[in-house]
Amino acid sequence: MKRHHFLCEALADLKTLQDMMMNFHSKYFDQLLVKIVGSDTIPFFLITHNGTHLRLMDTVKQFETEFFRIEAVDQEHCRGIVSLLRAFDYEGKDTNNIGDVIRLEKTATKKSIELGSISAIQLLKPDMLKGKFIIEPKW
């Protein structure tokens, strides 16, 4: 039960940080935090007890992903609502290989996750949602 409490707390903390980035407005600088970070999302993946990444399916757009954005946390029942992030490689094809991911795209698909089967959370760089990349020549 303690592990579940830790995961719920960590996701709630992540949600608070993400909301702070999105909702912070300055009289002079507007949404400065979003401009600095370059995104309103802190992407992450979840690691299950058997050491694999949790993968969820978007049945409408027909893609599978292991990249998520936190939308809500129910601390009482230790559940998280996540939206799916679609991952693309440099050719614009779907991928779940973290080494090939060039860009993450937000989707409207939301899923509820029971955190009992999750053992860890791994945060990713928010700039993965910017889609900017440079391919350097080999020579």
Image (cartoon, helix red, strand yellow):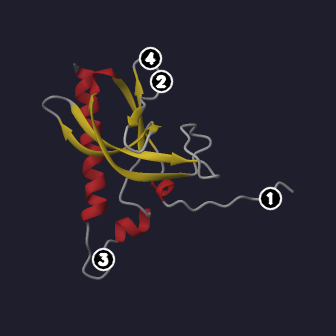
Between discs 1 and 4, the one toward the N terminus: 4
Between discs 3 and 2, the one toward the N terminus: 3
Between discs 3 and 4, the one toward the N terminus: 3
Q: CA distance from mark 3 to mark 2?
A: 40 Å
**Residue type beneath disc 2:** Thr
Residue pictured at 24% horizontal, 50% vertical? 16
Left or right: 102 with respect to 109?
A: right
Secondary structure type for disc 2:
loop
Circle 1 sits on which residue?
A: 137
Q: Assess disc 2: are there few (<14), some (14-19) or many (≥20) residues with their C-alpha within 10 Å of its C-alpha.
A: few
Q: Assess disc 3: are there few (<14), some (14-19) or many (≥20) residues with their C-alpha within 10 Å of its C-alpha.
A: few
Circle 4 sits on which residue?
A: 50
Q: Assess disc 4: are there few (<14), some (14-19) or many (≥20) residues with their C-alpha within 10 Å of its C-alpha.
A: few
Between discs 1 and 2, the one toward the N terminus: 2
Circle 2 sits on which residue?
A: 52
Q: Position of residue 101 (x, y in %)?
A: 57, 46
Tell me the quarter of the image containing the N terminus. top left
**Residue type beneath disc 3:** Asp
**Of 129 and 90, the residue lying toward us:** 90
Of the two numbered discs 3 and 1 in the rendering, the one whose residue sits closer to the viewer: 1
Q: CA distance from mark 2 to mark 4?
A: 6 Å
Left or right: 95 with respect to 30?
A: right
Tell me the quarter of the image containing the C terminus. bottom right
The answer to which quarter of the image holds residue 49 is top left
Circle 3 sits on which residue?
A: 30
Q: Assess disc 1: are there few (<14), some (14-19) or many (≥20) residues with their C-alpha within 10 Å of its C-alpha.
A: few
